[in-house]
Amino acid sequence: MDDLYLINSMWIIIGAILVIFMQGGFILLEAGSIRMKNAGHVSGKTIFSFGISSLVFWAVGYGFIFGDNGNFFAGMSNFFFSGTEVEGSSYSASAFFIFQLAFAGISLAIAFGGFAERAKLSVYLVFAVLFSALVYPVVAHWIWGGGWLAEHGKQDFAGSTVVHLTGAMAALSATILLKPRIGKYNANGTANNLSGHNQVYSALGVLILFIGWFGFNAGSTLGVEDGFFAFVALNTALAAAAGAISALLISWVVLGKSDIPTMLNGTLAGLVAITASCAFVEVWASVVIGFIAGIMVFYSARFFEKRKIDDPIFALSVHGLAGVWGTLSTGLFATPELATVGQAGLFYGGGFTQLTVQAMGVFISAAYAFGMSFIILLIMKKVLNGLRVTEEEELIGLDMSEHGSYGYPEAFTNNNKIKGLETVVPYKTETSQLVND
């Protein structure tokens, strides 16, 4: 066991810790982006869903992605991963497993953005198992595990498609089947702004995610020997910065005010977009990729809202559309020197070959993730007698209806009795916005 093996293994574990800590960023971002009555539920849900995804990934997910004796669709070995080391490897197999486990948990966290403020707790539990076993591992195998898209040279260094687009498509299937939250839309189709309760939480959550992304992208180098991880980190930081600025500016120009949630979403969109291309493009291109992503996320959120797709956490815009753009961007900006996978992009003499591969990968991966998630949720809807809590439970808030206590107990006075529980229906103004869906 040489020093390089130990250093590489330590670097991968550090990357895994940073990615796992991103779950804390999701807790703060999601809790801050929804209403107070659901904050405790969202926070707790993030922890237990990561626990479920970890166990499922250990049992079958890792094997479906990286297992031997597989085919173009999935791997077929290494189930119930034992920690056996691979002879001749430059890093620990156990370290690599933990790193990949962390990625699977992030994709599930993204998917659950489409469930926010209206799904039953049982739906989270069952979907976490099935998504972690049947949806995420299949797409990951196609691109990272030697599957058919890998054979075509699909470029996705750290997961704009594998992690982010896969999770976003699951979120889209959920929000379509669950339908909008009570009070989101009026009878004439206009939307009400159901604002999140704490922008400070949301901002801190984004900062934590920003820091964790260095493990996400730079950690995906899986080694430190040539120092390339620092170049990947540089591209990551600049894309995030550009996304934050462009989103802030576009909201200021269009709305007349600089919108904080838009700026936060722009930061994340820049990070999502550069995730695929961070190892394949020059520094100036990372700024362009992030800048465009910040503008796209602003218009994407407005697009979905007008079509009555209620996405409280903006998963479809931040992780979906930005994931598509980030994946396609390598087909434009990948350089011959950096394209260790696939070919150079259109702007570097590679023609449309790589761009076509990227587009094919985006389309088929998105279709599979959406279609499989939709089928799973449709079956669950029948078996579990619906996906959504009752209207009364939704008005009370999932903190109380699903867990029996509020995340902010001091904020509510005990002046109503509902189903034997002394509690208040928060935000009484919602009742004036109710419409028949």
Image (tube, helix red, strand yellow):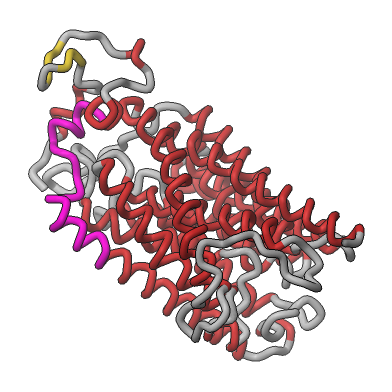
Is 346 positioned to the left or the right of 148 in the image? right
Say whether residue 72 is magenta: no
Residue 228 at least partly seen: yes
Image: 200 above or below 359: above
Please state which of residues 404 and 192 is positioned toward the viewer in this rendering.
Answer: 404
Image: 282 above or below 124: below
| Numbered disc total | 0
Image: 363 above or below 184: below
Q: Position of residue 429 (x, y in %)?
A: 20, 24
Q: Position of residue 418 (x, y in %)?
A: 12, 20
Q: Position of residue 132 (x, y in %)?
A: 42, 59
Residue at 65 percent of width and 55 percent of height: 216
Magenta stretch bounds: 375-397
Is 122 positioned to the left or the right of 27 in the image? left
Instruction: Examine the image and state in which quarter residue 138 appears.
Output: bottom left
Identify the main secondary structure in magenta: helix
Furthest-right residue in view?
Answer: 3
Residue at 48 percent of width and 75 percent of height: 362
Instruction: Examine the image and state in which quarter residue 175 appears.
Output: bottom left
Please state which of residues 337 and 6 is positioned toward the viewer in this rendering.
Answer: 6
Please state which of residues 14 and 306 is positioned toward the viewer in this rendering.
Answer: 14
Say whether residue 394 is magenta: yes
Instruction: Examine the image and state in which quarter residue 255 appears.
Output: top left
Q: Position of residue 69 (x, y in %)?
A: 54, 83
Residue 292 at least partly seen: no
